[in-house]
């Protein structure tokens, strides 16, 4: 019986078939051949600790979603009801499907089918589908993606004609109803979907549609290449989820465009993001917008899982193993670091130095009083729906077919892959490993006959001396092993994991060993703040029970002498708090000057290293980043403090702001001027006052000037003698002198306990968007302010004696953040 007649009978009878060992679908001309091709969903099954994570997810937030998350119950508009009609239901289903077929769980499969059937039956004669009261292109991009997964897993013959009909509708309506907002940002997802369909149907009109989507989308190749994330009035190109989601778009489109610029854009974008906004967890900040590199900035859980999917997609297309390295960094650190160990809670923002998680507004540009607090719904209710694809898609994308007819593990996880090679042979390989906690990966070839094909091994960038053995015998290492594999063959790959001290802001370090990032083991006190509809899914404050403010004693150039490694057997859940199978021990001293910010909800940034401390020498323990909710990841280092420079200058002619630390928004340099990004679409008082400081400076008496321009409202100016800077408009100790076109005044004041206190001010005609030379002279308690070489203010105040310099803008309308600063000069007086 033909599949075309057999499969529909199964679907309509309620039976859900599973496509098994299907051959991958390779690019069809004119799409460019690529090094690695995705295997159909269901080709890879989990084992070991990864299976545990998927089972925890099934028994946790995913399996109980209908009870905990209002947008995914039976009343969803995507299921024919009157409920949620946008992205939340599709987000959830996009994770549910690979989880169901990854675990081969019949209950989850039926739950997925209960969504798929009404979605497919909603298609109109003209091809459009879904809720009639929401015609946005964007959520349908998510649905199109999950439908292709469902087709791969089941062979459902309804999917391809459904998508063909929809894309024909889209082609005929895009000119009159072009992409906007989220669709403009995330069009790369649908281009990927279109190529998936084209490779199966050969419909040339699909490629024309892909070109049109590329033309209507944000110019991501240019944005990544030229670092233009912050140079738009719209918030979309600086949105913390749009960026990692869009990272794959140039690579995806390069399959059609064949442009080298599109191929280079991924790594160019990543380099810019990490230079200006990089966090020690290995990704840019995004709360929810790009926000600099403070150790207490975070990254949204949606961003983490979207970056994982972009990494997997781009790694296959570009053949760049370093992108797969980063996929592991996200999957093994940031993802579990955003989830409770039983996956009953998640956090909205994953923060490298997260020493307390207490309800309250921290001061992020997009602030929520529970954004750092674990619960079924943390922060804005998007991540609670979108995170479900994290672990399942890691499994799905862990293996790929190679262009030379073989297989490759893109990331190393315990799993079993079964697929059909280009040669037509079906093969099964079992991958047994405790990686990333252990350094050995064992591949067992469960074959019925001998088969010749290449196996391509990825050597992570951090591994310098990989070794392999075949059936117990050593052999010369090769990344590509081309041989005739026999039933029962066992290949063992060993990837020795070196210690590494990765530099960060204020000359801090974060400690890595192989693909794992290590953080201070902080004893946690979980206090329930909200009871969920079902037991075990409460929301919590998490408080530290022991000190966290340590500076490490180590030699970054000889870490093995400073750090002791303790390994134990791998537990069933290696991310269970207190059960880490690898721990690092080293000496440290407490640093009393490093403390919580004034709001008590976040730590200040570590002081500039090297630092000294008179506290007793202690032994501290570091554990994998993902095994705790509270953590310190960016550490100051003990040593002899450097003498502060007697002068500082920056004209930003080099196009960057290296050495500055920013708060409240993203900052950028354009035409030789440092400026904060327009802070539109924020919901935080912290966004009203944004600042950038130079932590390496420490002036007492000083002569400090810069060219400052302010917008039509608010004020902008110079900060001096600043300490304890943190998130929030007035979260710092120190002085500020600003100019205001709105009030036509020059004002001198100070921040005290997060409260602005004016010292003195004077009327002065200020023209908006015009540069003024502003200067402050401070000698002891005597403070003088000059504007255009005129002495304007003269005051006496002895609240603060020394500290760093910086610049600041305050505006009651964050959408009008348009201050600029240049020609910064300061010297000890």
Image (cartoon, rainbow, N blue to C red):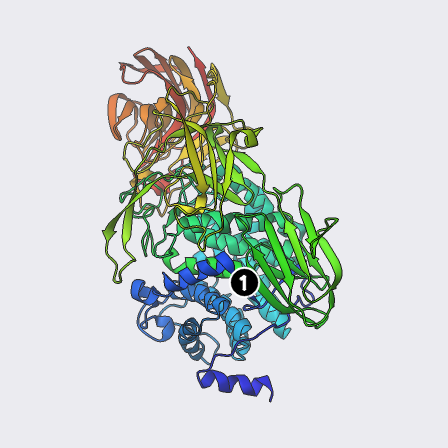
Left or right: 535, with 693 as reference point: left
Residue at 53%, 37% (x, y): give it.
Answer: 275
- Image coordinates of residue 666 in percent, x first then y, are 43, 39
Looking at the image, is 315 positioned above or below residue 662? below
Residue at disc 1, secondary structure: helix
* Front in this rendered view, residue 270 or 57: 57
Q: Closest to the observer: 311 or 772?
A: 311
Q: Nearer the viewer, residue 829 or 453?
A: 453
**Residue 18 position in % (x across, y down):** 53, 76
Give the mark count.
Answer: 1
* Residue 462 location, quadrant: top right
Q: Position of residue 487 (x, y in %)?
A: 69, 67
Q: Residue at x 33, y 53 (%)?
A: 380
Please name whichever residue, 130 or 586, is drawn nearer the observer in this view of the structure. 586
Give the residue displayed 49% in from the left and 28% down from the top.
Answer: 507
- Residue pointed to by mark 1: 396
- On-image quarter of the C terminus: top left
Query: What residue do we see at 45% from left, 55% from top?
Result: 572
């Amino acid at each position: 019986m033909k599949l075309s007649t057999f499969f529909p009978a199964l679907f309509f009878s309620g039976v859900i078939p599973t496509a098994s060992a299907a051959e991958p679908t390779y690019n069809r001309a004119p799409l460019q051949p690529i090094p690695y091709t995705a295997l159909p969903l269901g080709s890879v099954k989990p084992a070991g600790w990864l299976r545990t994570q998927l089972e925890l997810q099934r028994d946790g937030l995913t399996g109980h979603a209908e009870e905990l998350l209002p947008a995914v119950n039976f009343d969803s508009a995507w299921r024919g009801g009157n409920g949620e009609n946008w992205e939340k239901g599709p987000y959830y289903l996009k994770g549910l499907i690979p989880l169901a077929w990854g675990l081969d769980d019949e209950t989850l499969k039926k739950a997925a089918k209960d969504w798929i059937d009404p979605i497919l039956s909603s298609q109109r004669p003209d091809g459009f589908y879904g809720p009639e009261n929401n015609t946005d292109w964007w959520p349908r991009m998510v649905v199109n993606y999950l439908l292709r997964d469902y087709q791969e897993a089941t062979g459902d013959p309804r999917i391809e004609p459904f998508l063909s009909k929809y894309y024909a509708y889209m082609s005929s309506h895009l000119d009159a109803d072009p992409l906007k907002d989220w669709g403009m940002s995330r069009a790369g997802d649908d281009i990927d979907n279109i190529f998936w369909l084209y490779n199966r149907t050969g419909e040339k009109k699909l490629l024309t549609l892909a070109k049109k989507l590329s033309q209507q989308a944000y110019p991501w190749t240019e944005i990544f290449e030229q670092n233009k994330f912050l140079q738009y009035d719209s918030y979309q190109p600086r949105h913390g989820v749009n960026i990692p989601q869009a990272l794959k778009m140039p690579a995806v489109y390069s399959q059609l465009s064949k442009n080298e610029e599109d191929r280079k854009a991924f790594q160019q974008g990543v380099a810019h993001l990490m230079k200006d906004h990089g966090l020690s967890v290995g990704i840019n900040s995004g709360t929810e917008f790009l926000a600099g590199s403070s150790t207490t900035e975070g990254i949204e859980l949606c961003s983490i899982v979207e970056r994982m999917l972009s990494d997997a997609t781009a790694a296959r297309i570009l053949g760049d193993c370093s992108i797969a390295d980063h996929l592991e960094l996200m999957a093994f650190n940031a993802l579990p670091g955003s989830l409770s160990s039983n996956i009953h809670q998640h956090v909205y923002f994953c923060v490298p130095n997260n020493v307390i998680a207490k309800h309250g507004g921290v001061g992020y540009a997009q602030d929520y009083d529970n954004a750092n607090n674990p619960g079924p719904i943390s922060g804005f209710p998007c991540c609670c729906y979108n995170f479900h694809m994290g672990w399942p898609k890691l499994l799905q994308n862990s293996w790929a077919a190679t262009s030379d007819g073989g297989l490759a593990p893109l990331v190393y996880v315990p799993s079993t892959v079964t697929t059909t090679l280009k040669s037509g042979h079906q093969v099964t390989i079992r991958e047994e490993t405790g990686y990333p906690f252990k350094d050995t990966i064992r591949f067992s070839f469960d074959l019925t006959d001998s088969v010749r094909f290449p196996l391509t091994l990825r050597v992570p960038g951090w591994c310098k001396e990989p070794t392999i053995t075949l059936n117990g015998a050593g052999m010369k290492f090769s990344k590509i092993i081309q041989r005739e594999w026999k039933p029962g063959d066992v290949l063992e790959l060993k990837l020795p994991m070196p210690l590494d001290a990765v530099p960060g802001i204020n000359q801090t370090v974060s400690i890595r060993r192989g693909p794992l990032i290590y953080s201070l083991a902080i004893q946690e006190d979980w206090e329930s703040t909200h009871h969920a509809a079902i037991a075990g899914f409460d929301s919590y404050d998490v408080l530290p029970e022991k000190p966290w403010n340590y500076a490490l004693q180590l030699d970054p150039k000889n870490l093995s002498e400073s750090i002791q490694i303790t390994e134990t057997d791998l537990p069933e859940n290696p991310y269970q708090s207190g059960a880490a199978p690898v721990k690092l021990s080293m000496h440290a001293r407490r640093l009393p000057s490093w403390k919580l910010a004034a709001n008590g909800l976040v730590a200040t940034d570590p002081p500039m290293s090297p630092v000294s401390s008179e506290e007793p020498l202690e032994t501290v323990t570091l554990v994998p980043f993902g095994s705790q909710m509270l953590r310190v990841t960016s550490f100051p280092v003990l040593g002899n403090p450097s003498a502060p420079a007697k002068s500082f200058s920056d004209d930003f002619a080099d196009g960057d702001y290296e050495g500055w630390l920013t708060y409240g928004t993203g900052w950028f340099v354009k035409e030789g001027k440092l400026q904060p990004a327009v802070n539109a679409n924020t919901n935080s008082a912290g966004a009203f006052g944004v600042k950038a400081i130079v932590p390496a400076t420490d002036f007492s008496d000083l002569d400090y000037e810069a060219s400052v321009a302010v917008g039509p409202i608010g004020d902008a100016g110079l900060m001096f003698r600043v300490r304890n800077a943190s998130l929030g408009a007035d979260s710092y100790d120190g002085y500020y002198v600003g100019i205001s076109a709105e009030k036509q005044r020059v004002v001198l004041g100070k921040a005290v306990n997060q409260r602005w206190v004016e010292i003195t001010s004077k009327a002065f005609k200020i023209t908006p968007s015009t540069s003024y030379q502003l200067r402050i002279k401070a000698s002891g308690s005597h403070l003088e302010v000059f504007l255009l070489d005129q002495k304007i203010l003269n005051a006496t105040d002895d609240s603060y004696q020394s500290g760093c310099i910086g610049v600041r803008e305050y505006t009651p309308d964050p959408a009008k953040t348009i201050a600029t600063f240049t020609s910064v000069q300061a010297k000890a007086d």
